[in-house]
Amino acid sequence: MTTTTTTTRLDLKVHGMDCAEEVATLKHALVPLTGEERLSFDVLRGRLLVDMNGVAAGERGVLAAIKKTGLRAEPFTRAPAGPSREARRRSASTILGAALLAAAFATHVTLEGLTAALGSEGMGIAHSVPWLVRAIYLAAIAAAGWMVFPKAISSVRRVRPDMNLLMTIAVIGAVAIGEYFEAATVTVLFAVSLALESWSVGRARRAIEALLSLAPPTARVKRDGGEVELSPADVNVGDVFVVRPGERIALDGTITDGASAINQAPVTGESVPIEKGVGADVFAGTVNGDGALEVRVTKAAEDSTVAHIARLVEDAQSKRSRSEKFVERFAAIYTPVVLALAVLTAVVPPLLFGGAWAAWSYRALVLLVIGCPCALVISTPVAIVAGLAAAAARGVLVKSGEHLETPARIKAIALDKTGTLTTGKPTVIDVVPLAEHDRKAVLRIAAALELKSEHPIAHAVVEAARAEGIAAPPVESFVAIRGKGASGIVEGEEHWLGSHRFLDEKKQETPEVHKQLEALSADGKTIVVVGNARHVCGFITVADEIRKDASANVALLRAAGVEHVVMLTGDNLGTANAVARLTGVLEVRAELMPEDKLRMVDELRQKYGDVAMIGDGVNDAPAMAKASLGIAMGAVGSDAAIEAADVALMSDDLSAVPWLVGHARRVVAIVRQNIAFALAVKAVVVILTAVGTASLWMAIAADMGASLIVVANGLRLLRGDAALRSAK
């Protein structure tokens, strides 16, 4: 047995771990050796991670403990696997058991008629069953229970009752009171229920594997004047690979040749393809449009954005939500209580009230069967993992099941301004020419002076000039004036460029210019003044462009039930108020340092309870950590942003936040539906048992049906998400 990734972590595929009941069994066996904090379970993928640091028992001891539970472990592989040996054996034994049950029933009808074959219908009336029929029924019980009975024996050895033990006691009891038909029927139905449950869990598992296996299996790499198809894992950083039209991109990289519209929906959830050309970044798992591309690899396959997402989704599956923790604690008490009640049901009425031993023993057996907790314990993890997968397909990376439930309780949201309500990229809004200059002249002079600057506003000015086809002339005697602006000789005359304050120093401001500048500043715009020794040539207004759907998304947040939306920004109050007016944010806190944002989030939590903070994942990290839920905007390609937040929005689309609030409420609703339904079914059968109308086959059919219904209900979260369908 070997470990994967590192020598300190044991990464195992545990065959037969299809239900939270097996997780509880494994915990009971392993916690004494490792401690609970070193164990991580992924039921939907049958995966167990064991942190071996400080584990004295070693790898051999851990594997031996797993073997004693009746489960089999082997090294985990990410490659999608076909049906396991256990699944094939389960199917074969179930089919054989069902065939023998049918044969036994047909034989009994032939020998004694239908009434005798149906037995006493659970009334505990002793009757004779022909030895041949009895033998076939026992063979059916042995075949269908081939994989159940060893686990029951293991449960007895551990002194930890589980569903296998409950079912085994029920079957043995039914045989003891002569109910061979019902004993065999219960065994076969239980085997069918386990097989169907395994199939349902496998369906969810395959859906998640489809989501996490977005990158293609090969990349077409340029080598020695030709192209070679290699596994992405064998491609080095710096290699160039070719992407043909319609193909998925295999690795993160930068386009070196070609242009195309890239469909990033599988990673970011964006519905519209993004036009990209030379110098643009592309990500593994996204889909190329109509153009051929050459891409230089910037990250190894295991470090790509989609691989990082896959690891975090896998880790999130193993981190239990609040609902899962509750169900686990409830089930730990529930199963022993059911066993004790069954014993009391079998013993107390005959001893104290003169009841018939056979009839009350039968009712106790029914209680054992309906007491099987699998429908209850599987009700929550299926919904949580389906919710995590659907969110990832929408471009919303949620770090754990608990963080998936938190948005459903959010009452207030704090938003950073830059990069959240705005694009985070300054844009030229207008050019106001003065004196004898026109618009193009002002832009030409400004672009010449800003060409050598790295400031974002300088980039905005240069980009605006290029967009209008204006070529920046050369500059002589260029001087950058720190914190103020720049000067230089442009087209034979000295010009300068800078802020309103720089204009004051130049003493060239007229009352008319002052009035115009004050009006524009009040609207939250940054002013770039352009002048020469004779006069002011004009000014350029620059603003951080508000996202087109920002106001609509703020309205959607309120419609989703978020009571309070507040902007927290380090920008000046004028700019913040201007953005707030245009986006519908009613409360603004401006000119804040990081520690001020932290204090504001703390105040919001005291007032509203659960609060979310939306920021860039790095600068706002303290406030995001303080909030009930930290949400990072535009995290695609940014490992730092993904790591900093509880939730990472892979695109710059703020609409994902109201979607997440609604999605979280759907997840919580489905979890509650599943728990309530599983308990209600059991309660109904318990009542029917108490009045003597329930039978063993009815109990197992109810339990099997409940298990399948809660799984199907949880999987609705996958089927209903359009983004997931596009990812596939």
Image (tube, rainbow, N blue to C red):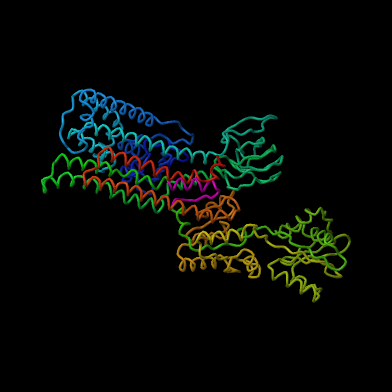
Range of magenta residues: 383-401
Question: Mainly helix, strand or loop, the magenta region?
Answer: helix
Q: Give the answer, above or below, for where 599 lies relative to 361.
A: below
> Residue 435 lies in what quarter of the image?
bottom right
The residue nearer to you, when weighing 234 against 637, is 637
Residue 33 rendering spot, x and y as whole percentages: 32, 44
The residue nearer to you, when weighing 349 against 281, is 349
Residue 690 rendering spot, x and y as whole percentages: 22, 47
Q: Is residue 595 left or right of residue 115?
A: right
* Residue 293 sits inside the magenta stretch: no
Residue, far bottom: 511
Q: Is residue 208 left or right of residue 71?
A: right
> Residue 346 lies in what quarter of the image?
top left
Q: Give the answer, above or below, for where 137 lies relative to 322.
A: above
Total number of numbered labels?
0
Quadrant placement of the N terminus: top left
Q: Is residue 94 left or right of residue 11?
A: left
Q: Is residue 421 left or right of residue 662?
A: right
The residue nearer to you, when weighing 458 against 131, is 131
Q: Give the answer, above or below, for where 662 lies relative to 63.
A: below
* Residue 394 sits inside the magenta stretch: yes
> Residue 87 lies in what quarter of the image?
top left
Residue 192 rendering spot, x and y as whole percentages: 34, 34
The residue nearer to you, when weighing 625 against 669, is 669
Quadrant placement of the C terminus: top right
Residue under the point 48% across and 57% down = 407
Residue 28 rendering spot, x and y as whole percentages: 31, 44
